[in-house]
Amino acid sequence: SNQLLVVTGDSGPVEESGAVATLGLDYEKLGFQTGQMAIKVLTEGADPATMAVEAQTEFNLIVNKSGAEALGVELPQAVLDKAETVIE
């Protein structure tokens, strides 16, 4: 079988997907950010048509250390240190 090092942008089930790492959206933070925009519309009278588009600027790094080891890949300590979640 092919041993491919997979890095994904979906912060879903990294372990089940076989991905070694993901750098994806934090949906909880995104929901909060969206809620803040809704507050501006609903309570402050902001016009959605004139509001600036907002994008999330912080992302979650999740690394699958056991998946990397299964492929013979050693993840640098700097990557492990930056990860919000490390799957052992």
Image: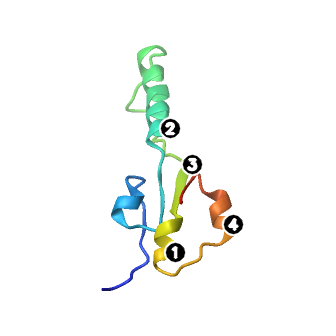
Indicate the position of residue 10 as horizontal and vertical percent values.
39, 56
User: Which residue is denoted by mark 2 in the rendering?
Assistant: 29
Q: Amino acid at mark 2?
A: Lys
- The residues bearing labels 2 and 4 have C-alpha atoms spaced at a distance of 24 Å
Residue at left 69%, top 66%?
78
Q: Earlier in the sequence, mark 2 or mark 4?
A: 2
Q: Nearer the viewer, mark 1 or mark 3?
A: 1
Query: Which disc number belongs to residue 78?
Result: 4
Residue at left 41%, top 16%?
42
Q: Amino acid at mark 3?
A: Glu
Q: Amino acid at mark 1?
A: Glu
Whether residues under marks 2 and 3 lie with C-beta atoms below 8 angstroms apart, the answer is yes
SS for callout 1 = helix
Q: How is the image coloured?
A: rainbow
Give whichever of 50, 43 is nearer the camera: 43
Q: Earlier in the sequence, mark 1 or mark 3?
A: 3
SS for callout 4 = helix
In this view, the residue farthest toward the bottom is: 1
Give whichever of 83, 16 is nearer the camera: 16
- The residues bearing labels 1 and 3 have C-alpha atoms spaced at a distance of 27 Å
User: Which residue is denoted by mark 1 in the rendering?
Assistant: 69
Whether residues under marks 4 and 3 lie with C-beta atoms below 8 angstroms apart, the answer is no
User: Which residue is denoted by mark 3 in the rendering?
Assistant: 58
Q: Earlier in the sequence, mark 4 or mark 1?
A: 1
